Structures are given as C-alpha cells and as structure tokens.
Image: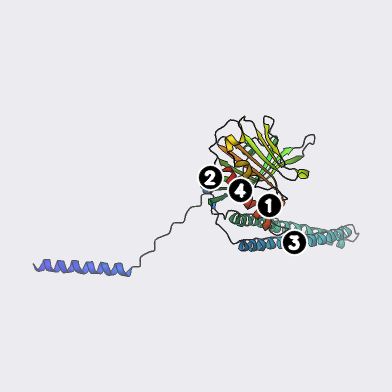
Amino acid sequence: MYQEEENSKLNEQETVANEEVKEEVPQEAPVEEKPVNNPEDGILIARRENISEVTEEIESKRQGLLAMFNKTKKYSRILMTIVVIAVIGAIIMIFNNLMVLKIIGYSLAGVVLVAMVIYYMVSKNKFPNASKEYIKEVTRLINEYDFDDPRFTEVRSFPDKKLSRTDLEVDRVYCNSNDIGSRNFIKAKFDGKDVEISENVLYSNVPGRKNQRSVVFLGKYVSLENDKKFDGRFIFNLKGNPEKLVDQPNDIEDCKVLLEEEGLVVYSSNDKSIKEIFGTKFISKLKEIRTDDKLLNFVMVFWAGHTAIYMSYDDSVTVLPFEHPFNLNAQDKYKADLVAALELATLEK
C-alpha cells in the first residue's frame, strides 16, 4: 500500500516536471511556405489607378538609364581620344632610332592594349544589362496602368513567351511573312472571357530586293474565342490616314467586299450578311473606334470560334520611353481602343 502511494507520487511529480519543461521550451513558429513561382502561371499584374505614381516611376527610371547611357558614351569618347593620342605617340617612338624610345613606344602600346581590354571587360555588359532591367520594369509599370479597368481580371504577363509567325498566319489577314518580333505577352479575362494580348512586328521580303524586308504589321495583337458558327471568315478594316496607309490586309484573294465606306472596308469569304452573323449594332459600334495619328490602322478578323484584333500604332505606343518622356496621351488612347475592341469582339448579336 505504501509502495503504491510512493509510485503514485512519483508519477505525479514526473507529470508536473514534464509540463514545466514544456512551458520552458519555446515553441518554434510555424514555417510559412512561400509560393513557388511557376513560369507557366505567369506574373500577376497589379492594378495601378494612380497614373501620377506610374509616370513618376517611369520618368525616374528613364532619367537613370539615360544618364548611364550619356555617361557611358562620354567615357567611351574620352577613352578613344586617349587611345588615339597614345597610339600615335607609340608609333612615333617605335620608329625612332633611339632604343630607349622604341622600348617606351612598345611599352606604351602594350599599356594601351591592356587598358582597352580591361575597360571592355568591365563595361561591355553594364549598359545592356541595365537596359534589360529597364525594359522589364517599365513594361510592368505600363501594364499595371493599361489594365486598371475592373473588367480585366487575372491579368498575368509571360515575359519569356513569344508568338510565332504561324500564330498570326492562321488568321489569314497577312500573307508572305518571313519573320516576327514578339514581346509583352499577356493573358487576362475581360468580362470573364479569356483574352491574350501581345506586341508584335511582322515582316515580309521586299520583292526584287535581296536581304531587304518590310513591315507588314506593327502593333498590338489580341486573340480570344467566340461562339459564332459560320464558314469562312470576315475581316473588318478601319483605315487610317489615306495618305499614309499602313498594315492593310493582303490575304484577301478569296474574299469579296461586303461593305465599303469612307475609312471602312469589310471583306468576307462567306455569303451571309453582316447583320445575320453580327447583328444590327456591330457596324455602328465599330465606327466608334477612331483611327488617328496614334492608331494608324484597325483590323478585326472573325472565324467560327476565333477572333483576332490587329491594332497598328505609331512609336508613341509601340516604343518604350527613352530619349523622350512617357507619352500618357498615347497610352490613354491605346487603353480606350483596347476596351472598345474587346467590347466589340464580345458584343452579343
């Protein structure tokens, strides 16, 4: 009986001791698992409604890169001047009859060569790397502003994704292309519908001129699905300045002109009317999109199940700001055009 009481007391003491130890030992904080950045999921673009913040950031980065460019150019000129003077001096001394001067001349030439190699190794990637970072950051800032409309959701950029010529050739708008430049690929939802947007330049060979090429299309390319059912395709073309026509559809040999008005041409390889496929409001809605000195040409092509939009812009939209400040008016024009084009593409019959 006594032994049982002693055992019981020992067990109680052990339990209390264990509890005290547990209280004294600090508990480790749970490790927060960081999400893995999967390139296939893209980079989520935040919404930036305060344009003043965006323009200030862009201008700050632009001024920084421009200062680096001017500084690099200045140092290169100074170095080149020193090199020319040193080389001339070394040549004069090398061809002198005095051995001492010859030695000095060869030594000077060696020093100049080593200095040039060192400068090249140190500076060759500095500005290119800074330029790449600038393009990445400024593109991000502009995207954050471009997609601030609440109808855009799940906006993600894919910096490494580029379209191929085939991606555009299947639309049957432009033919005879031989090369493509592609950047700033974005996936998003507009009013719940999946949309893909990218910046592209499409090239073709210049007939009769070897190794020369011309631009077939330069601007914003938009792709999305539709629920229409018909054979063939429809191409709607809002033309810009008639004296400076750019990016006109040229894959239209199998099409007929359904409608031609001032600044508007509709092509089709289908016998059905525009109203029958697109409804009565489509053309009037289309005419609300205005070509000008920024939007140079507008083309929309419809296939059963697929819609593509080609918006041709001038440099104020297609070229990132570097020598000149960010053009807010041009960017606002593109923003309005993009929303209007998507509203048109998703317009119910």
Q: Distance between the Cα atoms at labels 3 and 4?
A: 41 Å
Q: Residue at x 58, y 46 (%)?
A: 343
Instruction: Find disc 4 in the rendering and name its residue.
Output: 340
Q: Residue 125: tell me if it is visible.
A: no
Q: Is residue 241 above or below residue 57?
A: above
Q: Residue at x 54, y 48 (%)?
A: 188
For label 1, the residue is 317
| Residue 156 in the image: above or below residue 275 | below
- Camera-side mark, 1 or 3: 1
Number of marks in the image? 4
Q: Residues within 10 Å of mark 4 (few under 14, many from 20)?
A: some
Q: 57 or 280, which is in the foreground?
A: 280
Which residue matches tag 3?
A: 70
At x 61% / y 36%, what residue is drawn? 274
Q: Can the viewer see residue 60?
A: yes
Tag 3: residue type? Asn
Name the quadrant containing residue 330: bottom right
Residue depth check, mark 3 versus mark 4: number of the one nearer the observer: 4
Residue 92, position as x, y percentages in the image: 89, 59
Q: Determine whether label 1 and label 3 are within 8 Å by CB.
A: no
Tag 1, which secondary structure? helix
Instruction: Name the N-terminal-most of marks 4 and 1.
Output: 1
Secondary structure beneath dot 2 equals strand
Farthest residue toward the left?
1
Q: CA distance from mark 4 to mark 2?
A: 16 Å
Q: Which residue is mark 2?
A: 194
Earlier sequence position, callout 1 versus callout 3 = 3
